[in-house]
Image: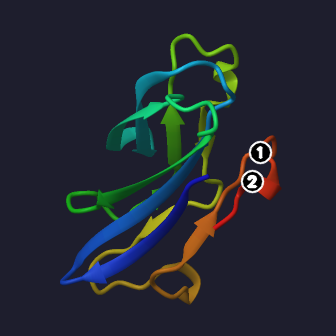
Amino acid sequence: MPTAEGHATDCLIKVRVEVLIENKAEGSNTTNADIYANRKLVGRQLFTWGRDTGERLYRLTFEWDTRGFPPREYKIRAEAFVWVDSSPFDNDLVVNQPVVLAPPGGAFPGGAETGGSVTETDPRFGKDRLGG
């Protein structure tokens, strides 16, 4: 469940993406968790899941350094691809609300404020599991 939040510091904008991954008890492995902005890889973390059968939820935090990215809207997608997964169709999630990068000193569309956050939840994920 990615969330995105931008912070401006000395004209450097980092977008924080937090991902909650659930292991459906299908063994153990080490794989990449990736974050994409408009299909361009902007973050990757290696993580190991399934060591402990009781450990089902994994929280990862990414920071996308937007230097060098032109002002526009970006669709964010998180993916944790596992080759031996019996249900690979649920290994990624797209954030429906785009991240908007405005030009330095420029305004956001519609006069929107800087910063903010958005949460996207896979409808198949049990809302009681989100926790704090």
Task: Identify the residue shown where x is 40% and y is 25%.
Answer: 30
* Residue located 51% across and 20% down the image: 82
Q: Which residue is mark 2?
A: 129
Q: Position of residue 12 (x, y in %)?
A: 22, 74
The kind of residue tagged 2 is: Arg
Q: Which mark is residue 65?
A: none
Label 2: how many residues lie within 10 Å, few (<14), some (14-19) or many (20+)? few
Q: Is residue 101 above or below residue 106?
A: above
Q: Examine the rendered structure and indicate whether residue 10 appears above or below residue 120.
A: below
**Residue type, mark 1 in image:** Phe
> Pointers 2 and 1 in contact (CB under 8 A)?
yes
Give residue 8's position: percent from left, percent from top.
31, 81
* Residue 125: mark: 1
> Can you say whether 52 is above or below 35 in the image?
above
Compare residues 117 and 111 and report the one nearer the observer. 117
In the structure shown, which secondary structural element does the residue marked by tag 2 occupy?
A: helix
The quarter of the rendered structure image containing the C terminus is bottom right
Q: Residue at x 64, y 37 (%)?
A: 54
